[in-house]
Amino acid sequence: MKKIFYLLFLVSLSSFSQEIALLKYSGGGDWYSNPTSLPNLIQFCNSNINTRIKAKPSTVEPGSPDLLSYPFVHMTGHGNVVFSDSDISNLRNYLTGGGFLHIDDNYGMDQYIRKEIKKIFPNTNLVEIPANHAIFQKPFPFPNGLPKIHEHDGTRAQAFGIFIENRLVLLYTYECDLGDGWEDPEVHNDPAAVRDKALKMGANIINYIFTN
C-alpha cells in the first residue's frame, strides 16, 4: 500500500490532484472544528512545495474502506473520542499499510485520544519526536522542533509519534494547536508570523509523507 501511495503522489505531480481527508470520529468530540484549517494548508502547500492537492479536503470515518484512499488523514477536536473495534482494526490496517494520521489536539482531547491510540497499537508506545527528526528539517527548518502556536496550558509544544519499522505513521501534536494557526487570520487573530510558522510546519508534515 505504501508503494501505491507513492505512485499516486507521483502521478499527481504530473497531471492529477491528490486528496487528503479529515477524520469524522465518534464520542462527542467536535471533529469538525477549525473548518478553514485544511483548505488553507492545502493552498499553502500547493503554492510553496509543489504539491497538487485538491482544494477541498474529504471527510472520512475511521471504519470506512475509503480511509485507505488517503495518504494523509487529519484529526482534531476538543473533547471525547471513541473508536469502535472495527474503527481500530481499520485504522491499524491503514497505518501499517502506508497511511499517515496526524492528530492535532485542539485543547481538551489529550486525556481521550491517548487511550484510543493505545487500542490501535497496544504494544507500541507514543514517543516524543526529537528536534533532529526529518519532519522538522525540510522544506522549512525548525531546529527546536514543534513550534508553539497557542498558549493553552503554557507548557512547551510536543510532538509524539508511533513508528513502524522506523517510519513515522502517526503524529500527535500536543500543546501546540497547528490547526488553529492554519485557520483564516480573523478566526484567532494570530500574528502573521505565527500563522506562517504553523503553515510551514504543516507543509513539512505533508512533505514528509511523500518523501519517506
Image (spheres, helix red, strand yellow):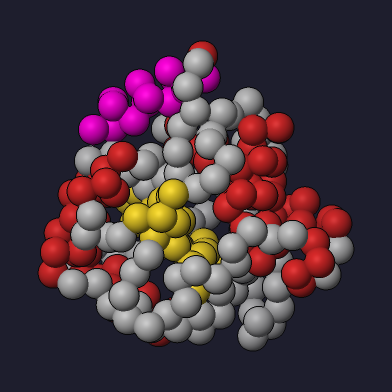
Q: Is 81 placed above or below 69 here?
A: below
- Relative to residue 162, is residue 48 drawn left or right? right
Residue name at image x 66 percent, y 82 percent: 152
Is 158 rendered above or below residue 182?
below
Residue 96: image x %, image y %? Answer: 22, 46
Residue nearer the viewer, 60 or 181: 60
Tell me if I can see residue 32 in this picture: yes
Residue 10 lies, with reference to residue 199, above or below; the image says: above
| Residue name at image x 34 percent, y 30 percent | 5
| 211 relative to 188 in the view: left or right | left
The dominant secondary structure in magenta is: helix
The answer to whether residue 18 is left or right of residue 167 is right
- Among all residues in the image, which is located at the extreme top? 14
Span shown in magenta = 1-13
**Residue 190 drawn in magenta:** no
Q: Position of residue 122 (x, y in %)?
A: 18, 68
**Numbered marks: total:** 0
Instruction: Name the image quarter holding the C terminus.
Output: top left
Which residue is located at x 51 percent, y 14 percent?
14
Viewer-proximal residue among 159 and 190: 190
Residue 7 painted magenta: yes
Residue 121, can we see it?
no
In the rendered view of the protein, which quadrant contains the N terminus? top left
Q: Is residue 123 left or right of residue 157?
A: left
Residue 50 image offset from top left, x and y in percent: 63, 26
Q: Residue at x 24, y 72 (%)?
A: 83
